[in-house]
Amino acid sequence: MSRELINAGIAGTGTYVPERVLYNSQLEELVDTSDEWIRSRSGIRERRIARPDQATSDLAVAAGERALENAGMAPEEVDLIITATNTPDMFFPATACLVQEKLGAKNAGAFDLAAGCTGFIYALATGSQFIATGSCRTVLVIGAENLSKITNWKDRNTCVLFGDGAGAVVLRPTVEDRCILSFKLRADGAGALHLHMPAGGSRQPATRETVGQNKHYIHMNGREVFKFAVRVMGEAAEEVLALAGLSKSDLDFFIPHQANIRIVKAAARRLGLPMEKVLVNVDRYGNTSTASIPLALEEALQSGRIKKGDNVVMVGFGAGLTWGAVAIKW
Ligand code: ACO
């Protein structure tokens, strides 16, 4: 028996960033770096840092509440919560379950999704499939990170890059063609060690020694990740455009993962897009991993840069290595 697939559309968005701003000049006091180096090599001017008492679920709940309000939905109407994160509150249970309880989404299933910084793209694609098959009518997709808690503040290679934040979208069935048009998810585990947290899992359980060796923090081969990102960003965008039956000239707005302004510009060049059609907020938030795309989406909507009927492509890349893209008609 074949069933018609149902279009999934974004019915609401919401974000949250912590109040505390950390400026490049403050990092100059922690490590051997400079505001000039950070700005010119990454485009970052400042980032937000969560309070010590704020865990990832707290950020996720704030963004989730706003998204539900924006969509005009009550928590009880949510069928499924997917939380994409690299910084769960705990190894287990899933952060999504903590979010479910705090939101009062008493009719929802909940799970976490780990796909590095591509997590939001993976979660959006996954959530859309629950809508497409008719098994859910309301899916809350959240990208939330507390990267400051897994950052080695003595490592200049990483500590200047990351920030905290959360963004959420509500997916609902739609009869219109303003919906998720296509997606593509990719992975290459051969590059897993270019970006990872070495200890704390079953390969190297946490011990005094692993903590002493800073193996519970982000370890990154920045140059390799940079080369990979520049290669895959434009490619993934072109793939989802083709799957949606669109060409590069049909693309109205581009939302890339915000890791480094040089990576964003390289992807835009490949797509032949002027920077007016590209959302950039890495200067204000740094790399917020799974939160970066929904934070950028909300900003583009609030500023009116995305208009009804626009073809929008979002692209992510990150640890795994993973990458992926989603095309949406807004
Ligand atoms: N301040 C000053 N100097 C620095 C700093 C710093 N904060 N960090 C590194 N350097 C030095 C390096 O030690 C190196 O010195 P050396 O030549 O004496 O060894 C020099 O600057 C140049 O280093 P590069 O790595 O070549 O610098 P690059 O221009 O590539 O910029 C950066 C580094 C910003 C990390 C870049 O490679 C990058 O953005 N990579 C991608 C990172 C990324 O996107 N990660 C997140 C992925 S998403 C996820 O899943 C979390």
Image: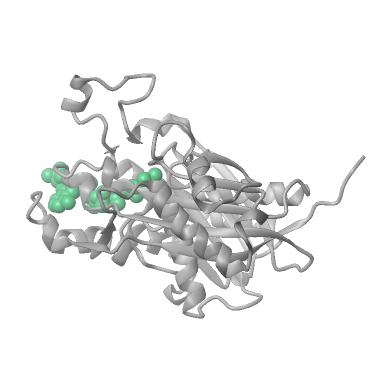
Residue 276 shown left or right of residue 156 in the figure: right
Q: Quadrant of the N terminus?
A: top right
- The number of numbered badges drawn on the structure is 0
Task: Work out whether residue 248 can be spotted.
Answer: no
Q: Residue at x 27, y 31 (%)?
A: 216
Q: Quadrant of the C terminus?
A: bottom right
Instruction: Examine the rendered structure and indicate whether residue 129 appears above or below residue 36.
Output: above
Q: Residue at x 8, y 50 (%)?
A: 32
Q: Quadrant of residue 45?
A: bottom left
Instruction: Examine the rendered structure and indicate whether residue 109 appears above or below residue 302.
Output: above
Colouring: one colour
Name the outermost residue toward the right. Answer: 1
Task: Say which of 141 and 23 sits in front.
Answer: 141
Residue 156, x across and y down, in percent: 16, 46
Q: Residue at x 32, y 26 (%)?
A: 200
Name the outermost residue toward the bottom. Answer: 304
Task: Say which of 28 and 81 sits in front.
Answer: 81
Residue 24, x across and y down, in percent: 17, 61
Q: Residue at x 79, y 65 (%)?
A: 175
Task: Say which of 241 and 11 sits in front.
Answer: 11
Residue 44 shown left or right of residue 174 in the figure: left
Task: Work out whether residue 215 can be spotted.
Answer: yes
Q: Quadrant of residue 75?
A: bottom right
Residue 141, x across and y down, in percent: 56, 52
Residue 4, x across and y down, in percent: 85, 51
Residue 169 shown left or right of residue 15 in the figure: right
